[in-house]
Amino acid sequence: MRSLFLALATSLLFATHAAAEPLAWQGPVPEELVARSHFIEVEGHQWHYVSSGEGPPLVLLHGLPVQSYLWRGVIPELAATHRVIVPDILGYGRSDKDDSITYDPGTLARHFEAFMEAMDFQEPVVLGVSDLGSVLGLHWASEHEEDVRGLILVEAVIRNGEDFYKAASFRMKAAFSTLRKNEKMAYRLIVEKNMGMQTMLPAMTVRDLSEAEQAEYEQAWADPEVRARVLLAAGPSQMPKKGRTTSPDQGTALMDAYAPWLASTEVPKLVLAAKPGLLIRRDEVKYIESTFENTTVVSIGKGKHFVQEDQPEAISSASAAWLATLPASRRP
């Protein structure tokens, strides 16, 4: 019976549309990016980040359960005109994962704010965000609008908690409910089975990752204690019932705070929509086009959730063209 429940939860959580034909792009870490790997200590924790290029700052944030490596195919073209900074969120990739803090979204948001302050940017930044990174980045942007030159939304969370839940597919809602109600199952799937790497990552890309690419992602989660400490704190098992916030450290609390701002702000926004997508699907695009101010929507082709793996050239080209239209600075 237990194995039946595990199979059900797995199928609900990682069910996808029919697979499209594989894409040809392969993207190991370019040597020049490896050479530009840096660490910065922020409030006693080491943040790893890649920095490439010169010019106005452009910060790219990954989501759960991946790392800065996700953006590797996007960086080179954007680094021709911008200083591109791609951090590993605290707990992810090569950043610290120790047990001195919790890794819930509220805590991560506070540490991301400290990271941005420590980077000491001398001019407004453009933020490119995905998944968990969108929750942290958009929350920061809503509280620092004068420091934001523009926003690039790629598979981003754009609604408040309750509206996000309402807009989710039946399968996503079932997965949230199943994992929230059964902590043992959540632990078995996410920690013991390492489903983030073994199932979610390959299921949510169109093309097949190479062995080297898969291994690069997996190295961050080799320790099950780290998976338990970090992934359980911000994963799907933490989605509250019907998306209704019950704690200020939940991701939905951050979403509730920034969603109204995101729709109404005049900060320029670029939305990159893949087909079929997961978080920004066709209905979400319609909502954005009818609701958001000062927003450009561009279709980037086939993709599920980790679209940077499938469409790096489309993302970088659309972003570069849009960046060229931005005013030099929005700071007064």
Image (tube, grey):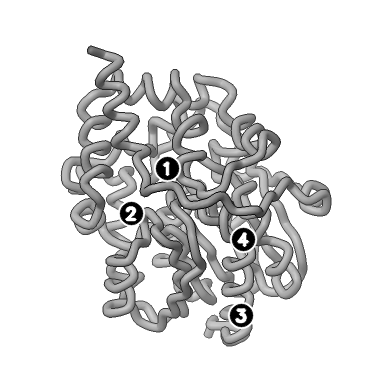
Q: Which residue is mark 3?
A: 321
Could you say which is closer to the camera, residue 164 or residue 27? 27
* Residue 58 marker: none
Dot 1 amino acid type? Thr
Mark 2: few/some/many CA within 10 Å (<14, 14-19, 20+): many
Q: Between disc 3 and disc 1, whose residue precedes?
A: 1
Q: Nearer the viewer, mark 1 or mark 2?
A: 2
Q: Which residue is mark 4?
A: 312
Q: CA distance from mark 4 to mark 3?
A: 14 Å
Q: Would you place residue 110 above or below residue 76 in this image? A: above
* Residue 107 marker: 1
Q: CA distance from mark 4 to mark 1?
A: 30 Å
Dot 3 amino acid type? Ala
Q: Quadrant location of residue 94?
A: top right
Dot 4 amino acid type? Pro
Q: Would you place residue 139 above or below residue 11 in this image? A: below
Q: Between disc 4 and disc 2, whose residue precedes?
A: 2
Mark 1: few/some/many CA within 10 Å (<14, 14-19, 20+): some
